[in-house]
Amino acid sequence: MLSDSIPRPEYPRPQFVRDEWLNLNGTWQFEIDQADSGLERGLLKRELAGSISVPFAPESIASGVTEVDFLQAVWYRREVTIPENWSERVILHFGAVDHDTTVWIDGVEVGRHRGGFTSFSFDVTAAVTAGRNSTLVVRARDLKDAVQARGKQATWYDNTHCNYTRTTGIWQTVWLESVPTLHIRRVAVTPQLGSSTFSVVATLNRNAPRSRLRVTLSDEAGLVVSSEVRADFDLSPELSLRVPQDRVRVWQPGDPHLYDLTYELLDGDGTVADTVTGYAGLRSVSIDGNRLLLNGEPVFQRLVLDQGYWPETLMTAPSDEALERDILLGLEAGFNGARLHQKVFEERYLYHADRLGYLVWGEYGDWGVSGQGPEGANQAPTASFVAEWMEAVARDVNHPSIVGWCPLNETHQIIHDRLTTLDDVTQAMFVATKLADPSRPVIDASGYSHRVRESDVYDSHSYEQDPGLFKAQQQPLATGEPWVNSRDGIPFSVPYRGQPFFVSEFGGIWWDPAAAAASGADRSQSWGYGDRVRDLDEFYERFDGLTGVLLDDPLMFGYCYTQLTDVFQEQNGIFDFGRRPKFDLGRIRAAQLRPAAYENGSAQTDPMEPATSSSEADEQVASPVARG
């Protein structure tokens, strides 16, 4: 049943807030266009046959449609009325639409966008009139055989293994916003902990004579600092805000302090033309040899893989509270952060991570398997991988919770004597990310094909289930030659050169009590990595053993356990798909919250120094010093 209430009513962009906006979620007309012939058949000009609840994808139960077959194209239609007091520019925003979007207002095309994970906007001022109804029509194409970033969406009909139900069309909030003729398009805020400053770069839509940009920083005690700069010559005026020493408070897990920010654009008469509010956290991420540091300290990253799926809403969170709850569940289980896996999470998730002090790695939804990565058969769309990823970085660059970027995941390439499209795309995404955000480390590709020698971080994925074999597998890191992913003994990657290292996927321990008690076909409905544990005691023994290997390694700056929740048939979560705990969370926390060798100062700061001997390492691990 479709509801008359507006789903997901909260403001979708907490770091860049204006007062005048209109949420367009709710019931829209809807029609599936399986042959992608709707334009020729007149779908643009007529009422659509069905209805849908936006922002839920038509494959989801919450949408009211629940069509899980491949959808080549879908159409949306609704009437919108621009408020009478919106007298200047009108911007139409889409949180995300999968995959290739065209938008019309009253039959006139107002914009197009390619990419299923990122937000986009169109200035529709010329197409609408305040106080008058307009007809908004959206067509989303999601061609079955197109080479595109799909994340965990299955490329065959059924959900199997770690491949999930597809998402087509609108799957995040749609909204309208009123902005002044002279306005701020976006801001980039970079904290500089060494000088206790925030560097602010504002992007303007245009310049005006004698205009100025004013930025004010405040905390719970009131005004901290304010600064102004001329905005009449530069489309991207920049200024710095230095925080007085007695008002400095860093953002960190356990104390995620956030400063409030107000951005004002003043016209030539000194009148405030545009006002936007946001926030920022003062923190740093730095690299010291093979150590990755947070605020100058070695903080072991106890991460969990978060797929961001829900049973009735798929990639769309059912509510804002659901986003916050997933972070709280991770914290309750002893994790201090997450690898946001194979989708670009919505901004409100990052807002809650900022508030709660949860470390996250921002990732693009490119899973380089099944021919769907940039090395697929049709190479033409690979430029869109770079373009969409840059949209994601530009949108999310201000979130203090993000401590690293991961453009690609498990791309496949055996080392050989020629360069390929994958090399080009990987290099382009790495370099573009570093140019867009020099303040964070970037891993060129997680797990498999490390193709960029200058990558800030190096990693591997291992689902070895035996703790003893897992320890032996990871031991070569002490010699400077860590275990890496390979095929038939041939590595996918360029050699390791002493960067900070972590195992960014491990565990995935398969536990589903219902399937464990079943047999035959009933057992096949559940999937996980390696051998299924026989009972809870075996699970705890394996979990403690696997996490202990990485916690006890002084050269490992963190790990990422697979995974936070079960997702459909993949039954290896700490919580089930309904977010109910599958285990004693006290035991899960205890296994993780033991002191990490990395935090005891025993990691090398110079990758060229001789490796610590195994006996020395054992002694250091046996006598851990709790970090203050």
Image (spheres, helix red, strand yellow):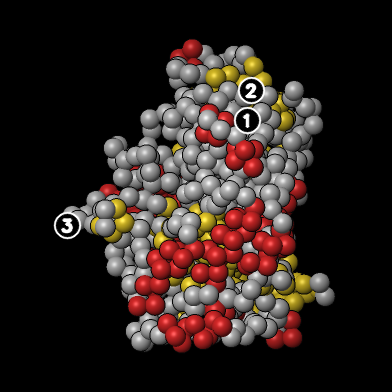
Q: Indicate the quadrant where residue 625 lies.
A: bottom right
Q: Could you say which disc has been placed on residue 417 in the image?
A: 3
| Badge 3 amino acid | Asp
Query: For the residues marked 1 and 2, what is the alpha-carbon distance in whole angstroms?
Result: 7 Å
Marks 1 & 2, CB-CB < 8 Å contact: yes
Q: Indicate the quadrant where residue 169 lies.
A: top right
SS class, disc 2: loop
| Badge 2 amino acid | Val
Q: Going from the N terminus, do you reach mark 2 or mark 3 first? A: 2
Q: Is residue 428 above or below residue 9?
A: below
Q: Residue 308: x percent and y percent?
A: 60, 46
Query: For the residues marked 1 and 3, what is the alpha-carbon distance in whole angstroms?
Result: 46 Å
Q: Is residue 481 above or below residue 510?
A: below
SS class, disc 1: loop
| Point 42% across, 82% down: residue | 614
Q: Residue 436: x percent and y percent?
A: 46, 62
Q: Residue 193: x percent and y percent?
A: 59, 79
Q: Nearer the viewer, residue 553 or 432?
A: 553
Q: Residue 331 vs residue 297: left or right?
A: right
| Badge 1 amino acid | Ser
Residue at which label 2 appears = 65
Q: Going from the N terminus, do you reach mark 1 or mark 3 first? A: 1
Q: Residue 352: x percent and y percent?
A: 70, 57
Mark 3 Cα shell of 10 Å, populated few (<14), some (14-19), many (≥20): few
Q: How many marks?
A: 3
Marks 2 & 3, CB-CB < 8 Å contact: no
Q: Is residue 317 above or below residue 504?
A: above
| Point 36% across, 69% down: residue | 482
| Point 36% across, 65% down: residue | 483
Q: Residue 3 vs residue 266: left or right?
A: right
SS class, disc 3: loop
Residue at which label 1 appears = 60
